[in-house]
Image (spheres, rainbow, N blue to C red):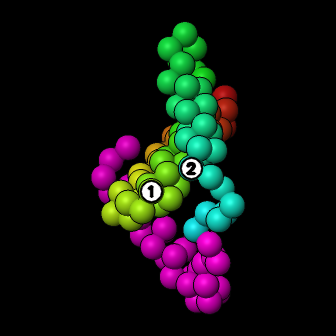
Amino acid sequence: MNYQERKDYITQVESEVIRACAKHDRVCDFFIDPRKRIVDIRDDLKKLRESNDRKEGKLTATFSGIIAEELFEAYEAYVMGDLNNCIKELAQVAAVAVRGMDFVYRQTMEFKTKEKYKERL
């Protein structure tokens, strides 16, 4: 995936942010459920990390698992009062989303290539 294609993703994300801000006057009332305890966040994060880091099955990591891990790291930082790290972790959530866009884009290109090949037959 080249930089220009990713830059196009960022432009798309930016336009979605602008659209969302115009559509909704607020994002949320709470960043995380205020009843969620740090011990629960850490337990969930530990399970996500174990699942994502499994060595015996290299295909076990999923987009949802990786993005959830980053999100729970943001929750952990937020609950601990480390707001700068929380923002960094949220940027990592966005980075994983862009990587997900890469994945889907590659599949789209593969599908188009297969369809063009079928047309030539």
**From what the image shows, is residue 66 above or below residue 17?**
above
Label ID, residue 50: none
Earlier in the chain: of badge 1 and badge 2, it is: 2
Where residue 44 sits: x, y (%)?
62, 39
Label 2 packing within 10 angstroms: few (<14), some (14-19), many (20+): some
> How far apart in space, not on screen, are marks 1 and 2 (Cα)?
8 Å
Q: Amino acid at mark 1?
A: Met
Where residue 103 sits: x, y (%)?
52, 41
Instruction: Identify the residue position indicated by label 2 in the image.
Output: 38
Q: Amino acid at mark 2?
A: Ile
Task: Classify the position of the N terminus by image quarter.
Answer: top left
Total labels: the figure holds 2
Residue 45 falls in image quadrant: top right
Question: Residue at left 30%, top 52%?
Answer: 3
94 sits left or right of 85 in the view: right
121 sits left or right of 70 in the view: right
**From what the image shows, is residue 23 above or below residue 28?**
below
Residue 7, magenta (yes or no): yes
Question: Residue at left 54%, top 74%?
Answer: 16
Label 1 packing within 10 angstroms: few (<14), some (14-19), many (20+): few
Q: Is residue 73 visible?
A: yes
Question: Residue at left 58%, top 68%?
Answer: 31
Instruction: Identify the residue position indicated by label 1 in the image.
Output: 80
SS for dot 2? helix
| Magenta residues, dominant SS class | helix
Which contiguous range is marked in magenta? Answer: 1-30
Q: Closest to the observer: 15 or 33?
A: 33
